[in-house]
Image: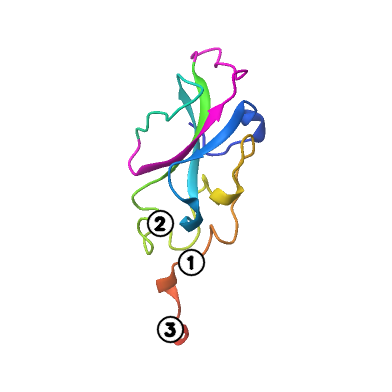
Amino acid sequence: MSSMLRNSQLTGEREVVWLEEIGTLDYVRQALDKVNTRRGRPRYERDGRLVGYTNLGPDADRDEDSGLFARRTFFLLPHDRPNDPCGPYQVGAPVEAVDPRTIEPGKVGVKTPRSQKPCADERTPASR
C-alpha cells in the first residue's frame, strides 16, 4: 500500500468503479493495494468503507516478487470528514486524500479547494 502514488504505477488501469455517489464527497483516500485479481471488487480490510476501486486491463502485469496485481482502492475511514464533518479533518485532508472528481484510470487524483474545505460549523459567529 502506498499513499504517494505516481501515474507510472497505474499504467494497467482501464476503469474506475465507484460504489457510492461521489458528487457529495469532498475527498476519498486512495491506496495501491496488492490483490490476486485484475477485475472485480477487491477485499477490503480497513476500518471505514470502500468507496471505489480500479479494474486492470488484460495486459496488466503481476508483481514479480509477490505474484499479485497492484490496484487502487478508494476509501473513507470513520474519522474522515464525510463521516465526521467536524472531526480531525474539518480543515484539510489526509495526505493520501484526493478529490474523487479528479480520478481517472491511469491518473493519480489531486487535492482541490473542495477537498481542503473547512467544516460548515467552523464559520465565525459573525457569519452565521
- Label 1, label 2: how far apart the Cα atoms are: 12 Å
Mark sitting earlier along the chain (3/1):
1
The magenta stretch is: 46-67
Q: Is residue 95 left or right of residue 50?
A: right
C-beta proximity under 8 Å, tags 2 and 3? no
Residue 63 screen position, x and y as percent? 55, 16
Residue 64 screen position, x and y as percent? 56, 12
Q: Nearer the viewer, mark 1 or mark 2?
A: 2
> Which residue: 47% across, 63% down?
91
List the single residue furthest toward the bottom. 126
- Label 2, label 3: how far apart the Cα atoms are: 22 Å
Q: Which residue is mark 3?
A: 128
Look at label 2 and name its amino acid: Pro
Residue 16 screen position, x and y as percent? 55, 37
Q: Is residue 119 above or below residue 46?
A: below
Mark sitting earlier along the chain (1/2):
2
Q: Which SS type dominates the magenta stretch?
A: loop
Quarter of the rendering containing residue 104? top right
Residue 127 screen position, x and y as percent? 47, 84
Graded by Cα atoms within 10 Å as few (under 14), some (14 to 19) or many (20 or more), the crowding at tag 2 reads some
Q: Which residue is mark 2?
A: 82
- Label 3, label 1: how far apart the Cα atoms are: 14 Å
**Badge 3 element:** loop
User: Which residue is at the front of the view, 125 or 10?
Assistant: 10
Q: Is residue 50 above or below residue 37?
A: below
Q: Which residue is mark 1?
A: 118
**Badge 1 element:** loop
Graded by Cα atoms within 10 Å as few (under 14), some (14 to 19) or many (20 or more), the crowding at tag 3 reads few
Instruction: Check residue 23 in the rendering and tell me which mark sits there, or answer none.
Output: none
> Which residue: 44% across, 71% down?
120
> Which residue: 52% across, 47% down?
95
> Which residue: 53% across, 60% down?
116
